[in-house]
Image (cartoon, rainbow, N blue to C red):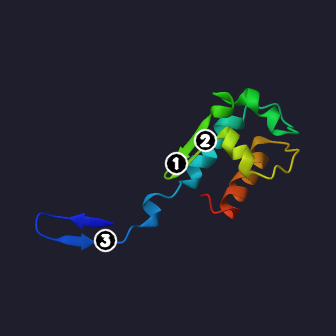
C-alpha cells in the first residue's frame, strides 16, 4: 500500500491480518443463523426455514462476505448433522481448508 504525503510517498506492506475474517465472529454468526433449524438435518434445505433472510442471509467479517446460498455451493455437505455445533464446526473446517477464511 502506498502512503503519499505532500512531498514523498512511502511504501508500507499490507498486513493481511487487517482484512482477514474473524473466525470467532463468523462462528457466532453461523451459530445464530442455523441454531433454530430442526436438528438432525439431512440436507441444506432443512436449514432454509431457520435463516433470517432465507438463502440470501449474508455472513460477513473482514474480507469474507458470503450468502447462505453461496456458502452452500462451497461446502461438501457431509449430512446428516445432529446439532448446530456439529454443522458449524464442519462449515468452519471446510471454509478454512479452502483458504476462504
The residue sitting at 28% across, 67% down in the picture is: 2
The answer to whether residue 88 is visible is no
Callout 1: SS: strand
Mark 1 vs mark 3: which is more N-terminal? 3
Residue 85 vs residue 100, the one in the foreground: 100
Image location (x, y in percent) of residue 13: 36, 72
Decide: is 49 above or below 60.
above
Q: Quadrant of residue 54?
A: top right
What residue does disc 1 label? 61
Q: 57 or 34: nearer the eye?
A: 57
* Mark linked to residue 29: 2
Where residue 72 sits, quadrant-wise, is: top right
Q: Is residue 43 left or right of residue 69?
A: right
Which residue position holds label 3?
Answer: 12
Residue 12: percent from left, percent from top: 31, 71
For label 3, the SS is loop
Residue 18 shows which numbered tag? none
Of callouts 1 and 2, the N-terminal one: 2
Amino acid at each position: 500500500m502506498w502512503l503519499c504525503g505532500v512531498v514523498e510517498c512511502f511504501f508500507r506492506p499490507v498486513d493481511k491480518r487487517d482484512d482477514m475474517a474473524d473466525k470467532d465472529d463468523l462462528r457466532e454468526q453461523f451459530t445464530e443463523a442455523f441454531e433454530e433449524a430442526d436438528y438432525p438435518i439431512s440436507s441444506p434445505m432443512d436449514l432454509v426455514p431457520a435463516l433470517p433472510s432465507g438463502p440470501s442471509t449474508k455472513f460477513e467479517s473482514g474480507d469474507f462476505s458470503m450468502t447462505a446460498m453461496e456458502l452452500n455451493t462451497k461446502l461438501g455437505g457431509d449430512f446428516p448433522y445432529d446439532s448446530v455445533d456439529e454443522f458449524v464446526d464442519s462449515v468452519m473446517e471446510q471454509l478454512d481448508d479452502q483458504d476462504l477464511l
